[in-house]
Amino acid sequence: MVSKAKSPSKAAKEERGNGDELHQLAGGSHPPMTTDQGTPISDDQNSLRVGQRGPTLLEDFILREKITHFDHERIPERIVHARGSAAHGFFELTASLKNYTTARILTEVGEKTPVFTRFSTVAGGAGSVDTPRDVRGFAVKLYTKEGNWDLVGNNIPVFFIQDAMKFPDLVHAVKMEPDRGFPQAASAHDTFWDFISLTPEAFHMIMWAMSDRAIPRSLRMIEGFGVHSFRLVNASGKSTFVKFHWRPKLGLQSTVWDEAVKLAGADPDFHRRDLFESIQAGNFPEWELGVQLFTEEQAAKFPFDHLDATKLIPEELVPLKIIGRMVLDRWPDNFFAETEQVAFCPSHLVPGIDFSNDPLLQGRLFSYLDTQLSRLGSPNFHQLPINAPKCPFANHQRDGHMQQQVPKGRVAYGPSSLQDDAPREDASRGFRSFPAEEAGERGRIRSETFADHYSQARLFYTSQTTHEQAHIALALVFELSKVETLHVREAVVGHLRHIDDDLAKRVAAGLALDKLPPAPKAKAPVLDMPPSPALQIIGKMKRTLQGRVVGILVNDGSDAKTVASVRKAAEAAGATVKVVAPKVGGAKLSDGKKLVADGQLAGTPSINFDAVAVVLSADGAGQLRDEAAAIDFLRDAFGHLKAIALDAGGQALFEVTGLDPDDGVIAATDTKAFIEGAKGRYFDREPRVRTLP
Ligand code: HDE
């Protein structure tokens, strides 16, 4: 039954009531809401209709504008590196490279250049999780005074393929399989390993991707690499090759695989949140920029071709020179406008830096500009605030979708003589390509110097600590166990025989293969190179609590003094401390005061922390022994090789887990020992908690 209509003005007022009350809760001054055309809006809660229960009118231009805009909110996500997190900051040069380059950003010591840096996973979609086994993108846009320079790198210094021609195949193989639409953000499936088993050049990168580099603890604890060789060109026109490296101030650190898997469920945004929280807290992530400089003559003597992106230059061969630092100190104001719309292109370069002939880089120079046109829909993407240079820019490019500029005058061409402020080339400051001489036959050629696919894979593997070697074997067994096709599993193990026979045997045993598969024919002899400890993670972990998080599990009646002393010691060592309690409101400690929790036990497992303390009341173990989350809190911390501090109540709960304590299980009163232990992981514990192949 239709109720009797009230007067329109009264009805409208009543319907709006709810919205108005909510608005009143927020403070501050509120600009009047308008349409996109600036027309003030009187009611943003109700569409225009006939009568109280009648049809909605097509005439409602406010509704249509709002819904239309919403319908078009998404832009195509990046085909790779769709999932990313970014921050603003600055780069500061600490050592001049003026003997090598004219690029101002590399010659003016002390000058600060604004940057925007985006980290990403590669395979997953924009809404996928932060912690899959994957390469991490490390893309830096430097807004220099001579134009934008994009250093679009990864956290691994080599790549899967040698020629850009293979990139679509690689990406199609790793992405979710086209018939079934899964797996999301994972390389552990048949199509990826099928492609890899038939692409021997990928095996060096595979060693890195199967190492703990691909499961970082934090984006603040990864290295970055420009991967390709670039050129620096100095004032007299001399060229020097260069490789760029970012080194995290907090040292390298990774999770253990089981932790990464569980994090994917417990906190899909683990890395994004970590970056956000550290910047908000003023703990600004920082990296050093290092360069490896070498001449064409030196390169000719390397036992590999530096133009092949599946090869790195060992630091023992060409040492790293630290020339600057990057600090990320500001989270973007708006995720879409900045992190999503930022458009990186390796072809964005400044005078004094130039490309090399690396065929992967050459292909990238085309791909990124092309992809931005499709993603952002217009050649004017450089006018978006996040992409616009911060130095003046002007040319005769005109018009196009979403043109923001309103150029004045008649002249949009050159040469011209009609306008005295038309932009002109500058022969002295303008970008000049290095005049390298090139000659040869045209052809679809793969250089013979690119033929060695296994020597550096072996170098990487043999340079690792025994713990890291075990993790590589474990990762290969995990990944290949997800591959359904037996011949693909076998083919991969065949390749491993060229890298390290023991590794091949371990993986074959982990897969329960009946016999060791034959190794495919290698195109070039496999060389033994001196180990490079710089390739380890464990060797480069810093024993520190800086940038790390300690979790303290408490319940009602926990000893207040113990909680306070653990907190004080952890904070003094640079850690952030978070309290976990059965209820998020907190727990009433022994001093009668309530300690507010940062997380509820069921939603805050110990995987969130680098080390944990469990401080419970005398009957705490009795209360929590049937609480799976409490038992898992300890079991996981132990299984993830972390330091654990226990008071008597915590000790009683630990006993319920049935775990055998080791020297990483420490009395909560011995804060000194706990803090020392918390600065690292107990890798020697690992064989006791999982089967290593
Ligand atoms: Fe990329 N890559 N890539 N890539 N790449 C993209 O560009 C491509 C490669 C890297 O945070 C795309 O804007 C080709 C190496 C990063 O926005 C696309 C080849 C390295 C990012 C593209 C490579 C990278 C991308 C997709 C082989 C390390 C994310 C979206 C020739 C040195 C940047 C986009 C961001 C993104 C193409 C190989 C790093 C399609 C063709 C090697 C960090 O243009």
Image (cartoon, helix red, strand yellow):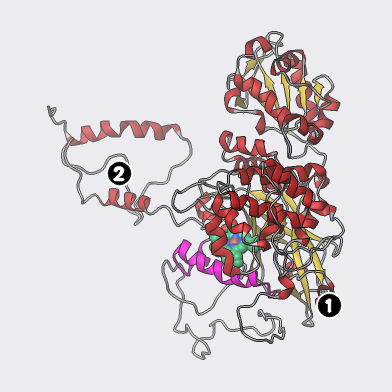
Task: Return the disc, 2 or 1, that comes first in the chain's sequence.
Answer: 2
Q: Is mark 2 within 8 Å of ligand 1?
A: no
The one nearer the camera, 418 or 129, is 129
- Residue 339 in sight: no
Number of labels in the image equals 2
Is 576 covered by the magenta stretch?
A: no
Quadrant in which the C terminus appears: top right
* Image location (x, y in percent) of residue 382: 53, 66
Is 364 covered by the magenta stretch?
A: yes
Left or right? Give the position of 110 relative to 608.
right
Residue 271 vertical placement versus 684 (above, below):
below
Residue 473 vertical placement versus 458 (above, below):
above
- Name which residue lies at 59% across and 49% down: 486
Residue wearing tag 1: 297
* Image location (x, y in percent) of residue 671: 83, 24
- Residue 206 in sight: yes
- Name which residue lies at 79% across and 66% down: 525
Q: Residue furthest front?
A: 514
Left or right? Give the position of 627 relative to 563.
left
The range drawn in magenta is 356-384
Left or right? Give the position of 317 relative to 68.
right
Query: Of the numbered discs in the image, which one, if any, rests on residue 42?
Result: 2
Quadrant in which the N terminus appears: top left
The one nearer the camera, 307 or 479, is 479
Amino acid under label 2? Ser
Chief secondary structure of the magenta span?
A: helix
* Ligand 1 quadrant assignment: bottom right
Q: Quadrant of residue 607?
A: top right
Decide: marks 2, 1 in contact (CB < 8 A)?
no
Amino acid under label 1? Glu
Whole-number angstrom distance, CA of label 2 to CA of label 1: 73 Å
Query: Of the numbered discs in the image, which one, if any, rests on residue 667?
Result: none
